[in-house]
Amino acid sequence: MINPLPRSFYDRDPNLVAQDLLGKVLVRNINKKILKGVIVEVEAYLSLGDEAAHGFKGKNQRNQSLYKEAGHAYVHSMRHHFLLDLVTEGVNVPSSVLIRAVQPIDGISVMKKSRGTDVVENLANGPGKFCVAFNIDKTLDGIDMTTPLSSLYVTESENLEKNIRIATSKRIGISRSQDMLLRFWIKENPFVSRKRKI
DNA sequence: CTACCGATTGACT
DNA sequence: GTCAATCGGTAGA
């Protein structure tokens, strides 16, 4: 069944959306191939007081999607990689949740081919790697993730894993607003990205 | 036009 | 732990 999370799920504080996204299933529909992965690591970027957020300095050509209604995708490039954000909190509020890692559960052979590795733990254990594995690029920037026709959306997990434990830390790789504890991951999950500066 | 830099990754000491 | 690769957007001459 195709059942994307509704806009109301995303239309909340990114801090809450980020933690609620852990354990949910991200689905990518490419032609007739379906890729799925459990979201195991995310980071929240706030609309106020967060200098690391791309919307902190206001709207520009690159971050327009951040200002769309909650539930849209914001894809941007970092070096030669793409990163995927899910827009939160209503229209014209530039907050989002960055998908940092997923645990592959469907379409793994396709992901292995895209990533050039057979090690499942390394297919999507980082924001850039995840985008390569799931074939996410700039063409997905600004799409609505709440319609059944979307080629990218998040849905409830089929396995009711309600006992997941959430760990928190500072975000990775940023130079401003470093002290905010806005990185969340599923504790002891082997598919999260490697720890670096924390 | 050039200079600079970042929400990264992979290779290496 | 350190470091370079060499993308795309932005600022400034």
Image (spheres, coloured by chain):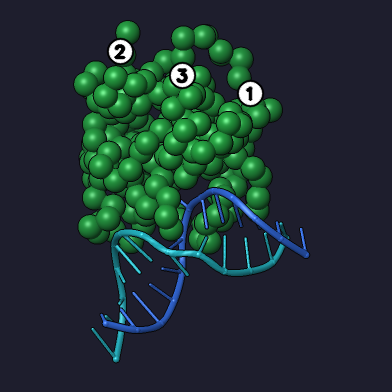
Chain colours: A green, B blue, C cyan
Query: Label 3 lies in what chain?
Result: A
Density class for disc 1 (Cα within 10 Å; few <14, some 14-19, many ≥20) is: few
Give percent across and percent down for residue A10. Answer: 34, 29
Density class for disc 2 (Cα within 10 Å; few <14, some 14-19, many ≥20) is: few
Q: Is residue A192 visible?
A: yes
What amino acid type is highlighted by mark number 2?
A: Ile
Q: Which residue is mark 3?
A: A106
What amino acid type is highlighted by mark number 1?
A: Arg
Cα separation between marks 3 and 1? 23 Å
Give percent across and percent down for residue A183. Answer: 55, 41
- Tag in front: 2 or 1: 2
Residue A6 versus residue A70 in the image, above or below: above
Which numbered tag is attached to residue A165?
1
What amino acid type is highlighted by mark number 3?
A: Asp
Residue at 46% across / 9% down in the picture?
Answer: A158
Q: Nearer the viewer, residue A16 or A158?
A: A158
Residue at 34% across / 21% down in the picture?
Answer: A33
Does the residue at mark 2 contact the one at mark 1 (Cβ under 8 Å)?
no
Q: Which residue is mark 2?
A: A2
Q: Is residue A13 visible?
A: no
Query: Label 2 lies in what chain?
Result: A
Does the residue at mark 3 contact the one at mark 1 (Cβ under 8 Å)?
no
Give percent across and percent down for residue A115. Answer: 49, 38
Name the quadrant of the N terminus of chain A.
Answer: top left
Give percent across and percent down for residue A31. Answer: 26, 24
Q: Nearer the viewer, residue A75 or A176?
A: A75
- Tag in front: 3 or 2: 3
Query: Label 1 lies in what chain?
Result: A
Cα separation between marks 3 and 2? 15 Å
